[in-house]
Amino acid sequence: VSAPLLRPRATDHQTAPGEVEVMKSARGLGARGAKGDRVSRPHANVVRDDSRRLFPTRTAGKRGTTNTGEVVGRRHGRQGACKPCQSAVNDPIVASSSSEPVAQGWGPVGSNEAIKSCTPTAAEDARTAVSLVRHGTFCTLATDTGTPFGTHVYYLVDEESGSPIIRVPSDSVEDLNLIKDGKCSLYIHPSGEATDCIARVTLMGRAVHLGRGEDEETSGVRDGFAQIASSLPPGERSFEDLVHDHDEVFRLEVDKAYVRRLACVITQQKEVEVVDEESFRQAETDPLAFVSPFMVKKWNAEHLEDIVRFTTYLTGITLEELESAKLLWIDSLGLYIRYQKFGEFPKDVRMGFPQRVTDEKALVSVLTMLGQVTWESQKPA
């Protein structure tokens, strides 16, 4: 394992954006201002966020488009995953979630169709979660009983394979367990309200010993953890942020990944998909993974009117029925919004982009244009 293959744990990206309430004054949404709706590119903030990734990432995946420019989303689809949808044809979300964009032209992809075709694959969501979170519950098999023994760990990521690189103290319970049996798992749970948007992931596989912390073979791992520690505020650093001479270093070779995420916007049903070893290895982290947290916070704070328009377009509910709406997460194929009607529990919906977005500049452009398109579709005749 060499240093260029490793990327340190991201920090502060799991903070959930504050909920933006839909106030009665928002009912006056109508004409868009000439200046107020223009979005400037937030160079400094994104660069500061991105600088925490001390090692380079791989380029975007090869998802591509069709001849008509339609986004090719899930390669494994979920058309059969949401059976309750078939009997919910009168639901307003289904009625407003056409696979055809606004005015049969360039525009947002409705929520029902977006879940099917404009969502990253389970393998891609797994790789994104592994890259973003950088900590989880590491389980080994106890030597005396054979039952799982869990402990919290931080890790680096081998960007070629997506395998987490973990350090454990020599002669610790985890180390002794792995000496007897290398079978292990790592549960990765993104924090905040975007949890199910990013996906919860359990990696299953075997731990391969790479050496001790003092060995030359693990110098890249040692340097990677040291750079993480140096990027953290002094008050957040701990003993576990460094690889010590007598630590043991392992790579979790992934055999399969279990990915839990939203499957149906009608019933809010979640499902678990199983990703095999090859699919996990070939998948890539979403290109907007490290830009999304900043953009979500910015749009919730500065573009409430667009989020409201997206919500009413996706769900068919009226502004008078809407108690709150907020943006949860953005990826290269679309975004998630959590909304709540008065007297009901919150629900999550997805809006697909009409084209794949691979960088922050393109994202700002697409969001701004989609805001304009939905405004045009909803303005009084």
Image (cartoon, grey):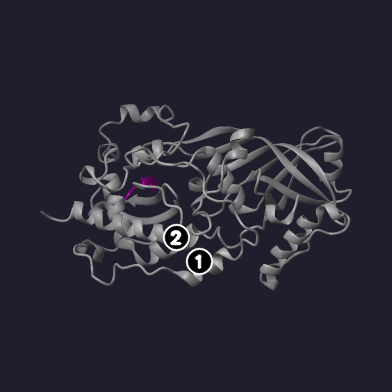
* Residue 32, quarter of the rendered image: bottom left
Q: Residue furthest front?
A: 67
- Residue 140 visible to the viewer: yes
* Residue 145, quarter of the rendered image: top right
Cβ–Cβ below 8 Å for labels 1 and 2? yes
Q: Position of residue 327 (x, y in %)?
A: 40, 56
Q: Position of residue 293 (x, y in %)?
A: 49, 59
Residue nearer the viewer, 356 or 116: 356
Q: Majority secondary structure of the magenta segment?
A: strand
Within-10-Å neighbours for mark 1: few <14, some 14–19, many 20+: some
Instruction: Specify whether residue 347 is painted magenta.
Output: yes
- Could you tell me which quadrant the C terminus lies in? bottom left
User: Disc 2 residue type?
Assistant: Glu
Is 375 on the left or on the right of 3, as rendered?
Answer: left
Vertical comparison of 275 with 360: above or below: above
Vertical comparison of 208 with 230: above or below: above
User: Disc 1 residue type?
Assistant: Val
Residue found 40% across the figure and 58% down from its top: 362
- Residue 18 visible to the viewer: no
Within-10-Å neighbours for mark 2: few <14, some 14–19, many 20+: many
Q: CA distance from mark 1 to mark 2?
A: 9 Å
Is 170 on the left or on the right of 24, as rendered?
Answer: right
The residue singled out by tag 2 in the image is 360
Q: Which residues are magenta?
A: 343-352
Q: Residue furthest left?
A: 381
Q: Position of residue 54 (x, y in %)?
A: 65, 62
Instruction: Specify whether residue 181 is painted magenta.
Output: no
* Label of residue 46 in the image: 1
Element on which disc 1 rests: helix
